[in-house]
Amino acid sequence: MMLLSYANNFYGYGYGYRGLYFDPTMILALLGLILTMIASAGVNSTFAKYNRVRCMRGMTGAEAAQQVLHAAGIYDVQIRHVSGKLTDHYDPRNKTLNLSDSTFSSNSVAAVCVAAHECGHAVQDQKKYGPLVLRSTLVPLANFGSQLSWPVFVIGLIFSLQPLVMAGIILFSLAVLFQLVTLPVEFNASSRALRILEDTGMLGAQEMTGAKKVLRAAAMTYVAALASSMLQLLRLILLSRRNDRD
């Protein structure tokens, strides 16, 4: 963690291994940060708006999740309450649907569609949806790559060891690949959720409009995260080429 922090300061604030200078590649990092901030603000704003709209049927996120799962023929997934806001997730390892404080007991349109989205992942798991299986396989590699990429890359730059520089880029690429695979997983989960909500009549026509906006805003956070990571990867490549020329 210390070396990772050092890497961020070392290149994040314009300090090169040859002194203080303006690093033009910082523009890429800044652009990625702006994209993620815009996407995050968008999902928070949209969720807050429809979190104030009560679902006409009065069901909570937990109740909606149970109905969606049963409508999909799934009865072996346990619904749990976890702390936090928008920390909702489905865990395929123990088949648990974990709903946050802002979803579990809330009867808002936002809560219902977020719960349904997580159910979409449970449906994917049941049907062995290819991208989800691939993403689960990539998890340990992506974690390994994201933790070691910057330390390895910076050590390579400091000591002019091009093989280490390339190793850092490859490790970071694993995290980018994980985020790339995540996109179809998330979009498909939302699509499945909306289909079930509409087919079962759990949400009315106007409520479905709000649900689509919430899930669309949430999807944009994944798109922004991928774009940010790709910009960061490009930055690593540019830094490695500059180091190679020097």
Image (cartoon, helix red, strand yellow):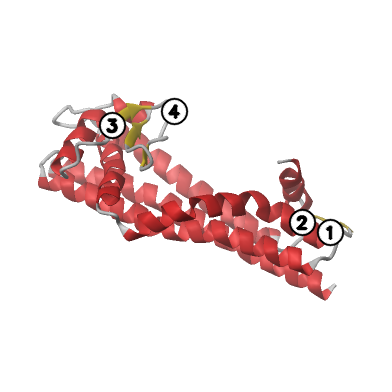
Q: Which residue is mark 4?
A: 84
Q: Amino acid at mark 1?
A: Ile
What residue lies at 68% left-to-right and 68% top-to-bottom?
237
Specify whether 40 is left or right of 153.
left
Q: Which numbered marker is on residue 154? A: 2
Specify whether 245 is left or right of 220.
right
Q: Quadrant of the N terminus?
A: top right
Q: Quadrant of residue 50?
A: top left
Q: CA distance from mark 4 to mark 3?
A: 19 Å
Q: Which residue is mark 3?
A: 78
Q: Earlier in the sequence, mark 1 or mark 4?
A: 4
Q: CA distance from mark 1 to mark 2?
A: 6 Å
Q: Which numbered marker is on residue 158? A: 1
SS at badge 1? helix
Q: Quadrant of residue 65?
A: top left
Position in image of residue 14 (x %, y %): 78, 54
Specify whether 193 is left or right of 185.
left
Is label 2 in contact with label 4 (beta carbons under 8 Å)?
A: no
Q: Earlier in the sequence, mark 4 or mark 3?
A: 3
Q: CA distance from mark 1 to mark 4?
A: 40 Å
Q: Is 117 above or below relative to 241?
A: above
Is residue 181 at least partly visible in the picture?
yes
Position in image of residue 46 (x %, y %): 36, 41
SS at badge 3? strand
Question: Which dot, 3 or 1, sits closer to the camera?
Answer: 3
SS at badge 4? loop
Question: Which dot, 2 or 4, sits closer to the camera?
Answer: 2
Q: Amino acid at mark 4?
A: Gly
Is label 1 in contact with label 2 (beta carbons under 8 Å)?
A: yes
Is residue 232 at least partly visible in the picture?
no
